[in-house]
Amino acid sequence: MTRHQAPDLSPYSSLGEALRAALDKFQEHTCLIEADRERENCRLSYSDFNAAAQDIASALQSSGFAEADRAAIIMSNQSKWLIAAYAVFCSGGVLIPIDFKLTAAEHLALLAHSKTRSLIVEFPIWRALTQSPAFSNLSVVQVLVTEAPKNADLKGAQRWEDCDSTAPPRFVPRRRTDLACIVYSSGTGGRPKGCMLTHSNYLEQCQSLMAWYPFWPGVRYLSILPTNHAIDFMVGFIGPFVCGATVVHLRTLRPEYLKEAFARFKITYASVVPMVLKAIEGGLRTRFNELPPFRRWVLDRLITINRLLTRREPRPELSRRLFPQIHQALGGELRALITGGAFAEPATLQFFYDLGIPVANGYGLTEAGTAVTVNDLNPFRSDTVGKPLPGVELRILDANGEGIGQVAVRGPTVMQGYWNDPEQTAEILVDGWLLTGDLGRLDSSGHLLLLGRLKNMIVTEGGKNIYPEDIEAAFAGLAVKEFCVFAVNYVWKQQSLAGEQLMIVLRLDPGAEVTKGLLDDLKSRNRSLADFKRLSGYVVWEDDFPRTASMKIKRNVLAEQIAAGSARETALKEL
Amino acid sequence: MSTPDQTLLQLIDLAASHFRVPASELNPDDDFFKKLKINSLQTLDLLTKLESHFNVELPDYELQGVTDFRTLADRIQARL
């Protein structure tokens, strides 16, 4: 099997420089394909990409955009996201990638917090922003709107399609220590946490990831995660670009088009959240169960043989010969699926590996760049989140008798701190170590096993980090004496990250009961939240909440009291 | 062309048969994620069924922020 070398990014001082060199080196190679269902929206060479980005960089610079100015992108997963990002880096700017699935009010809050100067946004999102009550507070200088209908009222925004580089833009150099991005890891409803990541953080991360999972011209990466997601930003943009690979954007997640895209574009790698992984697994298992008994028996024997022959390392050619129909249906070129950011069930990972489709399961957090550990597949381990990437140091703090403690990270990819928030920075960055708030242990071979959380938060199957404090605002004014939102596992600890849920703890007024009116109000407010942020249950608590001198709820103390005073099965009611 | 009420009723019937729950248990303002115990991917599956029934194309982003049958029916109606 051909061994591909990781690119050497050491000569470059910024993401802009590394990308510019790639655009120059791979001019005629295809860099982007954008598909929507069975339609192909566009196909760009590296040279086309450069020309498109020059138009946007020119529009930014002619409006006065200067080095270190901040530009936000709010777009679903599509080619213009990458074009806009490169235009920002070319112009020496700091990129603010914002999750397009947040509400308009949340978008506006993050734009204000980041002091964004220029906003690049899709028309439906812009329309929602302009209709929000908080829109009048928006203070950005420039707005570029993509894909707006011809006669739409753009409320003073500039149309992306009208940008034209009559005056070629300047390439503004940046240093490795300069900020490249501010990425919000939480705080949409409370206190925003904007992770400050430098050009060095990203270049180092890219270098180490590409050492284990190399890209090269000819590789096709299927991008279905939004590019504001840390994984897609790295392995669906920076990584493939510096290696001359092709990124295929699919603008729908419908299973029928997703499957077709693998075959149609002969995909080499794709990143998926565990929810999508389980959906693909479910589809395959259904088909397997429908096989006639003899064919099913043969399939099961082949799976056993494949498992035996690949126990040391994946053997893609062999697996493709053992399961030709499965691999042909996926295009015949798939080398690995990449997942992380949320708990993936070991049985699901093993299911794919046994069919010759390794899943590169990893662990990371925005505060540490993208990934901290990744499964190196030598050998494949479905029960762990892999080993630390080159250059990353891991420590287990305050380990108990079983070696389980808080995971701490140190290395060149760790953020500089939270934007404009030294207090929260000091809590998470201690003596050069990033305290992750996750519980785990390292096994004898250096693999990390994640075994719960120390912090009060959940990660959904869709890869979304949800902090309870961020959604409490949605329940303000509830007809109770006081309330508090918790991750269920933060209160009743369990050594697993499976099935994480949120709950609300209600302290009723003296003599009051849970009425239908209260429950209806609770359900109605719950429904107003994005589906991935919703509470799954409630607990009625009989005592006043413990509070600090400044009247803040002592969440950790309250959690301990609830766990000591009640069992999950009886106290937690479904909402 | 269906009236808005007809669209809503047809939508509820389709959701009920697709996810095998009695239509009588579904109400227009129900949160379909919770009521049908489905995730966003399963909802996309339902959208495909709806597109085929109503002969319209519903981009994924049409579902953004939509959680109840009535609003979903409105989005379909706007494209009929």
Image: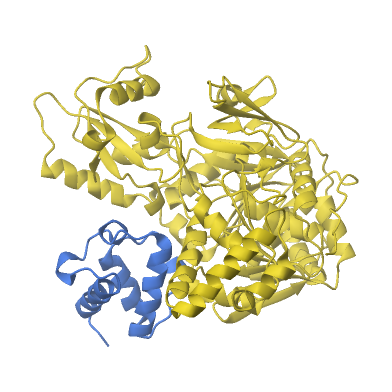
Q: Visible in this render: residue B64?
A: no
Front position in the image: A148 or A244: A244
Residue lying at the far bottom of the rendered structure = B1
Residue A418 position, x and y percent, is 61, 32
Examine the rendered structure and indicate whether residue A40 appears above or below residue A412: below
What is the quadrant of residue A298 in the picture?
bottom right
Residue lying at the far left of the rendered structure = A511
Q: How many callouts does the rendering have?
A: 0
Q: Is residue B78 left or right of residue A255?
A: left
Q: Which chain is depicted yellow?
A: A
Q: Is residue A87 left or right of residue A559?
A: right
| Residue drawn at point x = 52 percent, y = 47 percent | A342
Front position in the image: B52 or A14: B52
| Applied colour scheme | by chain
| Residue drawn at point x = 22 percent, y = 82 percent | B3
What is the quadrant of residue A504 in the picture?
top left
Front position in the image: A26 or A320: A320
Examine the rendered structure and indicate whether residue A465 appears above or below residue B70: above
| Residue drawn at point x = 35 percent, y = 78 percent | B50
| Residue drawn at point x = 31 percent, y = 17 percent | A546
Examine the rendered structure and indicate whether residue A243 appears above or below residue A371: below
Task: Please identify the quadrant where the N terminus of chain A is shown.
Answer: bottom right
Residue A394 position, x and y percent, is 68, 30
Q: Is residue A289 left or right of residue B37?
A: right
Q: Which chain is depicted blue?
A: B
